[in-house]
Amino acid sequence: MGGDYAPKANVLGAIAAHELLSPNEHLVLIGDTQQIKPILAEQGFNADHFEYIHTDEVIGMGEHPTRAITQKPNSSISVGFSMLKKGEIDAFIGAGNSGAMMVGAVFSVKTVPGIIRPSLCTLVPKLNGGTGLMLDVGANADCKPDVLVQFGIVGSLYAENVMHINNPKVGLINIGEEDEKGNMLSLATFPLMKECKQFNFIGNIEGRDLFNEKADVIVCDGFTGNIMLKLAESFYVMTIQKGLKDEFFDRFNYENHGGSPVLGVNAPVIIGHGISTPKAVKNMVLQAREMITTGLVEKIQAAFK
Amino acid sequence: MGGDYAPKANVLGAIAAHELLSPNEHLVLIGDTQQIKPILAEQGFNADHFEYIHTDEVIGMGEHPTRAITQKPNSSISVGFSMLKKGEIDAFIGAGNSGAMMVGAVFSVKTVPGIIRPSLCTLVPKLNGGTGLMLDVGANADCKPDVLVQFGIVGSLYAENVMHINNPKVGLINIGEEDEKGNMLSLATFPLMKECKQFNFIGNIEGRDLFNEKADVIVCDGFTGNIMLKLAESFYVMTIQKGLKDEFFDRFNYENHGGSPVLGVNAPVIIGHGISTPKAVKNMVLQAREMITTGLVEKIQAAFK
């Protein structure tokens, strides 16, 4: 039920994803079945392909995350996380209230032991045709150096396993390339990253390096990452508005990537863009499948043992 | 002598600016006259139009700012600031080592009494055809809330006087529009800006608002501002590389704006881009003239009395 175009976009996305799943992979639609079923009928889609859990509450985009999760136990977000916790589903995807999705993840399946703060990632198109990962993009506005180092570890594991990048290059967002450049946070983080043996640290990168090949995993605090992400999105919107057609700019379209994975909780969770379309939902399903089949969460748990 | 194309680009820029200055406005070229004079001759330009101060040292782009300023007293940067301090020139422009320019400004003409930290600004093209001002963009990687409030005051004065924007709207870069969003710094800054009577505070703005009409003056710490600036520049470079022609993207070209004014020191100082072209240098001269004739520094001094 989450997202501006829910439930229709979500149901259409599930239908599109279904075609690409193998027979042993199942989609569970959590939401108002009275709204969901007619959409399936409209599409001439056999409703038996999905499982359904009926919910009759909806958490609005503007609601306070913690309060909403507690006060609406029969919302699709609350029910989804409860099922994820019980192991009734292997991954949970939602395009609703991001804060409630984040809080729900931490409250239900909990943070991986050893991880200080779970993080929210975004996929970044690279000029060379590849894709990078930036984290954190808003879950943690203030970060300490050891939190940033952990972002490097989980980001590297995601890039290696889910994005299939060999020995991913991890860069620290900074205001200069030189080792001694930065604010207090990046200056304190740099030596810790340099010492860390759990990822391939390539040093400081700058705002201009987001789209080039310098780093596959771009680490920053959630304040900086959120601002960079929104600035980059505004560029994409401008190129669209101006009718500037380009294959690279097309890849800015979040629809092609799916959603933002939450890294550092004990199950795969993906938060979709509020304006998620069927295509975005379909790609989130495929992204979640990849997180499940590659055992990403288990690998993150092992890294912090 | 500052900048990748010095002294030629600087001399050509001075020639172009000269055409636009009135008879009582004079340019002083500080640098190696043995290199400067042949360029003038080549252009068939009457050398008597300018004044010259010969220098025979050059501060390189990679040199340590404070050390370079002290060890090279006969560099164009050191001599320029010494002249500015003595009142022999009314404004100083340079496209060389930014750190040395910043340090030189603070060491020579000093910070305006009452100002905690001088700031470095950049001009931002707006989609509606106007121009905005963003500060700080790198002089202050770590800022306290009261420093950001002062950026609002000096930025507003620059926008009003030099950019001729009536009652400029000042926005605080943040990760959400709501009053209670942000990191510790922005959360602490918001109420101070709201209380401040010295500028028109319009609240929080996001990364996506850099180019829209929400705010004329965009306030952030120098870490965030530097990363936003470089990210935006990388987009401009991409549109060029991809041959995407658009009037708006053309306005990203720093050449059209001149350079980055240093606000909060007791004289007009402008730091040019390292790759400043003749056009950029010409526009820096015009920008400096505007800072002089509008009495910007005196107005900033009065605001902090």
Image (tube, coloured by chain):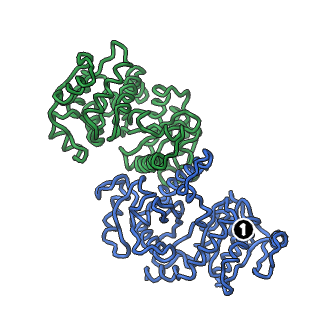
Chain colours: A green, B blue
Label 1: which residue? B10
Choose between A85 and B210: the one closer to the eye.
B210
The structure residue drawn at horizontal position 52% and vertical position 53%, both measured from the top left corner, is B232
* Direction from residue B20 to residue B37 in the image, left or right: right
Report whether residue A82 is seen. no
Determine whether the residue tagged by mark 1 lies in a helix, strand or loop: helix
A228 to A57, vertically: above or below? below
Q: Quadrant of the N terminus of chain A?
A: top left
Q: Could you tell me the amino acid type at mark 1?
A: Asn
**Depth order, front residue of A48/A86:** A48
Seen in the image, is B278 located left or right of residue A164? right
Image coordinates of residue A37 in percent, x first then y, are 20, 25
Write the residue at 34% across / 53% down. B176
Image coordinates for residue A30, horizontal then vertical, percent: 22, 28
Total number of numbered labels? 1
Chain containing the residue with disc 1: B
In the figure, residue A86 lies in which quadrant? top left
Q: In the image, what residue occupies the spot 42% across and 69% down?
A: B152
